[in-house]
Image (cartoon, coloured by chain):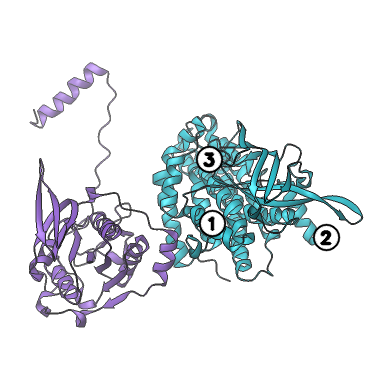
Chain colours: A purple, B cyan
Amino acid sequence: MKIVVCIKQVPDTKGGVKFNPDGTLDRAAMMTIMNPDDKAGLEAALRLKDQYGAEVTVITMGLPKAEDVLREAMAMGADKGILVTDRVLGGADTWATSQTLAGAIRNLDYDLIITGRQAIDGDTAQVGPQISEHLGIPVISYAQKIEIDGDSVIVERQYDDRYHVLKAKMPCLITALAELNEPRYMTPGGIFDACDAEITVWGRANLVDVEDSNLGLKGSPTQIAKASDKVRKGAGEKVNLDVTESVDYIVGKLKDRHVI
Amino acid sequence: MDFTLSKKHEMARTLFKEFAEKEVKPLAIEVDETEEFPRATVEKMAKAGFMGIPIPKEYGGQGCDVLTYVMCVEELAKVCGTTAVIVSAHTSLCCDPILTYGTEEQKQKYLPDLASGRKIGAFGLTEPGAGTDAQGQQTKAVLDGDEWVLNGSKIFITNGKEADVYVIFAITGMVEKRGKMAKEISAFIVEKGTPGFSFGTKEKKMGIRGSSTYELIFTDCRIPKENMLGQQGKGFGIAMHTLDGGRIGIAAQALGIGEGALERTIAYVKERKQFGRAIGAFQNTQFQIADMATKAQAAQFLVYKAALTKDQYTKDHKTSYNVEAAMAKLYAAEMAMEVTTKAVQLHGGYGYTREYEVERMMRDAKITEIYEGTSEVQRMVISGSLLK
């Protein structure tokens, strides 16, 4: 079985957020981690590899430094890493990103594609399903459990108050939730091997069946009007009152603001 | 000369740090309070490959270098001295001598289980009458047919009751040395469960309280002849050489304890207010922190240098690392003691309570000046090499 896992290097929320003048994220200037949903997707792929035997290829689109996230995935147990990087791909929204990844994946043999549900930077949850659409394969999103049954997958799709059990013929695409599993740690030996491993680097020229008009900032229908970091809240108001006075004070404030 | 870590080592540190923060730190107070061996953590470390970092892949290890192993012990020690010494004693004192002195059969038999963490290792040299004077051994091994029969006891054994494989030293005869009769010491691999091998009392310790420190008792304990490690009569050299490596592990543990106490102190002095100011704003605090950080950094250089020298030895057995290991352990242990003591002082009354972890760190630090060669022994090794 061949599994492709799409992963994304995202800003570490512990570090500060920085923006380019055009409103897109300045990824080069931020601390980064592997997107949590993607990490769960990778773990799901590695468990399928442990259970059934599989070749796991991780792929990411990003700046050259996104290579780090591929090496991390390989140190966890992925077999191959592909970095899709090119200046013309910069500033991509979900549409242009999914076009790029689909164009890259067309070069590969696969039975299963796993993506995270959504990335913690954009929070759109669109890229996975869009890739499946471009490739013309079924998608099962929000997977909380994945099993292989012959040439099909059986997936529990999470809903608010229930889950659906769906079966799809492979090849297909699954989007994973961070709750799907507890991702394994890298191993020290895995790190050493991953650092010595060759990472395949692809650019625009390697993308198959993709129009230039669908790539990069120019190919992105989303236009960012304004972006800002979380606005810091003021220090608030401090008062020293006894219990009864405190209750009256708070109730008074809530009434003033027509909350109650 | 370059002080920057390679990409591999940077990634390895990220891994160890994340593991230590998530899996080890939350249990550190409990491990100390209950004095229970953190078995579940050891299983997690085994899964992540931490129990066989410098062991070659052909024997089921991670195939990494000594520096990577040292960074693992360091990061673990920053949050829990007990967990750090479990890895150190297992790797340096059991896996390493089997790798260095074992026959191919012994390596194939023992290392894959040890390096994967399915089994835990320990080392038994110290006896009630033989601490720094390791020649004072009383435990005897007598060959009877195809078996060695062990009688005697070992004390203060780290991983004592929790281990599965033990490297044990015993007298196998008397030999003439410079006109005098001297004890001939040999090394053996002993497995848990061997009839005649039992456990004595558990030590109640000041620090590293979860590390399972036991007495090992051998009463007509028969082990197969092929379990002798190295040549007959070479045991003393094996013990000393093994301890040279072990000292680098303990130096890393001491380094981590000191660094951990420093990190907590920096956070505390920024927060704690007295006389309307954070205590970090007082020059006394600033100078103490500066001294602590400088010594911790110096210790790190010595420890990493010792690790790199041992790596050189792995490639070329002509290189020796005993002096580097002694300097690293001497300095790192004394730094750990000093830094943790200052950390408690800077925490004031809170630092004396068990709620604030610097109290535990100060207790944990003390043993690093004692085990695997006291600071005095390290000074003997260092000066001995200079005054030959």
Residue B91, above or below B209: below
Q: Nearer the viewer, residue B376 or B228?
A: B228
| SS of the residue under disc 2 | loop
**Residue closest to the far right:** B179
Residue B231 percent across, percent down from the top left: 71, 59
Label 2 marks a residue whose chain is B
**Residue closest to the far bottom:** A205
Residue drawn at 57 percent across, 61 percent down: B105
- Name the mark on residue B109: 1
Quick one: label 3, few (<14), some, or many (20+) residues within 10 Å?
A: some
Q: Earlier in the sequence, mark 3 or mark 2?
A: 3
| SS of the residue under disc 1 | helix
The residue identified by callout 2 is B387
Do marks 3 and 1 both belong to one polypeptide chain? yes
Which three-letter amino acid code belongs to the residue tagged 2? Leu
The residue identified by callout 3 is B162
Label 1 marks a residue whose chain is B
- Left or right of B249 in this view: A46: left
